[in-house]
Amino acid sequence: MSDEKIIIMIDEDGKIQADAIGFKGNICLKELEKLLEGLPEIEKLDKKPDFYQKNVKYKHKTILK
């Protein structure tokens, strides 16, 4: 089993950046939605190459405003 983790970073302006590591496919979007539920809408979504792989695991980077 690979190491899957989501790293959340909050800068001094309150912007939130989430990085899903070890996931492939779009499964990380579901995990990020659960984790970030109730927070502001996503302002920017950068999909990493692993996003386009089969739904095994995924990497994802999101910036919230």
Image: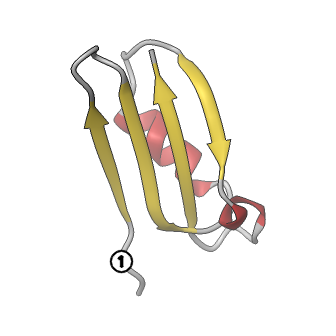
At horizontal 65% and vertical 57% (from top left) the residue drawn is 48
Residue 19 position, x and y percent, is 43, 50
What amino acid is labelled 1 in the image? Asp
Q: Which residue is mark 1?
A: 3
Q: Position of residue 47 (x, y in %)?
A: 67, 49
Left or right side of 2 for 45: right
Report which quarter residue 55 is drawn in.
bottom right
State which quadrant residue 18 falls in. top left
Q: Is residue 19 left or right of residue 46?
A: left
**Residue 27 x %, y %:** 59, 56
In the rendered image, the residue lying farthest to the bottom is 1
Residue furthest left as drawn? 12
Q: Quadrant of residue 3?
A: bottom left
Going 52% across and 15% down the picture, which residue do you hit?
41
Q: Position of residue 14 (x, y in %)?
A: 28, 16
Quarter of the image where the N terminus is located? bottom left
Residue 29 vs residue 4: left or right? right
Q: Quadrant of the C terminus?
A: top left
In the structure shown, which secondary structural element does the residue marked by tag 1 occupy? loop
Q: Is residue 53 left or right of residue 10?
A: right
Q: Residue at x 39, y 69 (%)?
A: 4
| 34 and 19: which is toward the camera | 19
